[in-house]
Image (cartoon, rainbow, N blue to C red):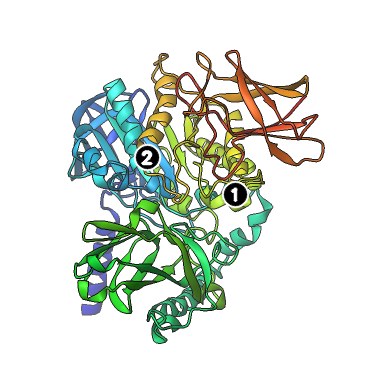
């Protein structure tokens, strides 16, 4: 009898829990709802129970289905607020305060979208001047899932100097421009994850149209996925243990007397990109020798090592100095005076857990400051690989392990939320497979639009210039991926921010996010907010014809005409190829408002012309009168 009563009590408690009124995290205090379109609100309640949602005197009701799910649609609302939203079901009620109606933008991609305001150029100033209470941010918690989810983690925050440091910088500057120019509330949802492929952001239904992913999708959908993941996790734990107790620490590779005669060289700061290190996950030791003038000794010093992906331990002259975790954290340590001498050596144990890797950033951030004098530490460092993930039989269980993992966890839960559109900053992770991006990028855009059920605006950032400039024209996967991004402009209601003039050779994360956000916002201000005085388009090649042995290239989107930027006054960045397909640097000059004449003594009859076709086209200097850099291109000469 006692056991039966206990069972009845437990069943009643379970029913009570199931009957609780529940709302997804995307709805909450301080949220922004999209103006001028029906406002969809959804959640969970007891099956069959009626739920009523009220906002600014407007109500909508619906009954929860047999699974307890419900959705209502409130009438469209003009910009305004703050309001209170209430959700009631029987005696249960949830209330959200400080709700605004305005413009909502979804902001997604990899690390350059994730990049926080606290890490941008002039960050202290930007954060201090970020008092915009009518702007709100929702940072989506990082999460991976094998099946589409109904909820995600995160919460809305009012924009202020106390909160903005953790906002997506690109999203913040984009939203700030929209808010200042329109005067309406703006909410931006930051759903991004550094080092991620585009495939992980596409739904399973859409990615299944690409046969390449059949095996991975079949595994996700099979009963064996749990066993596969657990086995991989066990192997990964062994890999992690190896990174913690690697041979380098056991054998004291950090000691100045250790034999490094067989070690190789890699320049720093520069993300690992050579054949051996480019695809490596694991542990690499890096060392660098430097001298200190005798008269400066006796002082404590500040050691700065730029950023290191993902974590490191640092020694100077065999003495442990410190360790830091986080791929986007500037490494700064105090080195005691007694550790230093006239001849010194730094040893850094770099641990890379996935994607990217190495010491990266600006050369100006690599130095030893002692006695008021900076001793530069950039240049050729020696390195030796200690631990490699491929020695362990595991498939990394990360966001790129399978397609759709981040769509399932970080996009699907908010499908249906009213929004104006999307801004996107991704592509670096797909550079090595740039040709696939021609199909994958349009697939993502079409996929998301199909899920939401309408053709919302979709604007993106073209990849910035990166890596070292070259003296001879060569093929470039970075240029090819930029071209794939440009080709996607064929889709309606799209726009591209060209930033080949904003990148940094040694840092894949340009700190100038202000201009990136501003250039993105031009598309929204013109297309979506009717500000026809805003010029948004970069010059783009229209055609190229052969005339008197030269290529005459015609451009669209020149505003009031093409311009040469730079102190020398002549165009750079153009190359031409003849029938042999070999490209040579060419002379170029502007002819009229919208034409450029390109010629090369080495190519008598040019067949193709390229502009800014390189990893880092740092000399490309063609602009329109609106100050927008010309779009890189490759075109046949007719």
Name the outermost residue toward the bottom.
251
| Residue 547 located left or right of residue 371 | right
Taking the image as shown, residue 292 lies to the left or right of residue 452, namely: left
- Pointer 2 and pointer 1: residues touching (CB < 8 Å)? no
* Neighbour tally class for label 1: few under 14, some 14-19, many 20 plus, Cα within 10 Å: many
Is 265 in front, or is 12? 265
Q: Nearer the viewer, residue 266 or 419?
A: 266
Spot occupied by residue 36 in the image (x, y as percentages of width and height): 35, 22
**Mark 2 closeness class: few <14, some 14–19, many ≥20 residues within 10 Å:** some
* Rendered residue at 50%/48% (across/down): 201
Q: Quadrant of residue 419?
A: top left
In the rendering, at what x and y percent does residue 462 appear?
51, 38
SS under mark 1: helix
**Is residue 581 among what the camera can see?**
yes
Residue displayed at 39% across by 82% down: 249
Residue under label 1: 207
Q: Residue at x 39, y 28 (%)?
A: 521
Element at label 2? loop
Q: Which quarter of the rendering shows the N terminus?
A: bottom left
Q: Is residue 207 above or below residue 595?
A: below
Asked whether the viewer can see residue 65, the reply is no
- On screen, residue 191 versus residue 158, left or right, reads right
Label whose residue precedes the other's in the sequence (2 or 1): 1
**Which label number is shown at residue 199?**
none
- The number of numbered discs placed on residues in the rendered structure image is 2
Q: Position of residue 255 (x, y in %)?
A: 37, 81
Counting from the top left corner in percent of width and height, residue 40 is at 36, 34
Q: Quadrant of the C terminus?
A: top right
Q: Which residue is mark 2?
A: 512
Taking depth in this image into account, of 547 and 172 the one nearest to the observer is 547
Which image quadrant is residue 181 in?
top left
Residue 382 versus residue 442 in the image, above or below:
below
């Amino acid at each position: 009898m006692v056991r039966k009563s206990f069972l009845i009590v437990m069943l009643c408690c379970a029913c009570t829990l199931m009957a609780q009124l529940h709302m997804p995290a995307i709805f909450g205090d301080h949220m922004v709802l999209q103006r001028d379109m029906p406002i969809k609100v959804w959640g969970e309640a007891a099956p069959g129970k009626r739920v009523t949602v009220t906002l600014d005197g407007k109500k909508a009701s619906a009954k929860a289905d047999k699974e307890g799910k419900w959705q209502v649609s409130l009438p469209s609302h003009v910009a305004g607020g703050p309001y209170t939203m209430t959700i009631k079901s029987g005696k249960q009620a949830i209330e959200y305060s400080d709700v605004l109606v305005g413009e909502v933008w979804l902001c997604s991609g990899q690390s350059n979208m994730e990049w926080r305001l606290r890490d941008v150029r002039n960050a202290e100033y930007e954060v201090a001047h970020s008092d915009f209470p009518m702007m709100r941010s929702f940072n989506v918690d990082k999460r991976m899932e094998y099946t589409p989810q109904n909820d995600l983690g995160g919460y809305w925050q009012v924009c202020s100097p106390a909160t903005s440091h953790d906002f997506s910088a690109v999203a913040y500057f984009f939203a700030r421009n929209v808010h200042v120019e329109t005067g309406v509330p703006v909410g931006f949802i930051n759903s991004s994850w550094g080092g991620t492929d585009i495939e992980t952001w596409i739904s399973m239904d859409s990615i299944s149209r690409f046969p390449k992913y059949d095996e991975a999708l079949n595994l996700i959908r099979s009963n064996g996925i749990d066993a596969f993941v657990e086995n991989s996790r066990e192997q990964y734990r062994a890999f992690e243990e190896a990174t913690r107790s690697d041979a380098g620490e056991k054998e004291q590779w950090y000691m100045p007397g250790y034999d490094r005669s067989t070690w190789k060289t890699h320049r720093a700061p520069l993300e690992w990109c050579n054949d051996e290190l480019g695809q490596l996950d694991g542990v690499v030791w890096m060392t660098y020798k430097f001298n200190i003038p005798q008269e400066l000794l006796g002082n404590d010093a500040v050691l700065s090592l730029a950023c290191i992906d993902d974590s490191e331990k640092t020694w100077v002259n065999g003495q442990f100095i410190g360790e830091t975790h986080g791929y986007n954290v500037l490494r700064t340590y105090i080195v005691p005076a007694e550790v230093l001498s006239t001849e010194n050596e730094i040893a850094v144990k770099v641990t890379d857990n996935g994607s990217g890797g190495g010491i990266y950033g600006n050369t100006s951030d690599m130095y030893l400051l002692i006695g008021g004098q900076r001793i530069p530490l950039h240049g050729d460092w020696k390195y030796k690989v200690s631990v490699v993930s491929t020695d362990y039989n595991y498939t990394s269980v990360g966001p790129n392990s399978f397609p759709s993992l981040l769509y399932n966890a970080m996009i699907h839960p908010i499908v249906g939320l009213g929004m104006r559109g999307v801004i996107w900053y991704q592509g670096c992770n797909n550079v090595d497979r740039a040709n696939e991006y021609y199909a994958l990028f349009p697939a993502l855009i079409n996929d998301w639009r199909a899920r939401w059920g309408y053709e919302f605006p979709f604007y993106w950032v073209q990849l910035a210039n990166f890596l070292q400039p070259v003296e001879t024209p060569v093929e470039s996967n970075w240029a090819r991926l930029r071209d794939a991004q440009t080709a996607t402009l064929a889709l309606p209601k799209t726009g591209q921010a060209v930033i080949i003039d904003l990148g940094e050779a040694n840092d894949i994360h340009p700190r100038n996010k202000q201009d990136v956000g501003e250039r993105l916002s031009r598309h929204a201000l013109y297309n979506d907010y009717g500000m026809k005085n805003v010029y948004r388009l970069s010059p783009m090649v229209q055609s190229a014809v052969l005339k008197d042995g030269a290529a005459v290239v015609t451009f669209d989107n020149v505003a009031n005409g093409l311009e040469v930027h730079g102190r020398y006054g002549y165009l750079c960045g153009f190359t031409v190829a003849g029938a042999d397909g070999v490209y040579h640097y060419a002379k170029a000059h502007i002819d009229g408002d919208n034409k450029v004449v390109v010629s090369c003594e080495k190519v008598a009859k040019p067949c193709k012309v390229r502009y800014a076709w390189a990893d880092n086209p740092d000399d490309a200097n063609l602009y329109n009168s609106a100050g927008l850099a010309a779009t890189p291109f490759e075109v046949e000469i007719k």
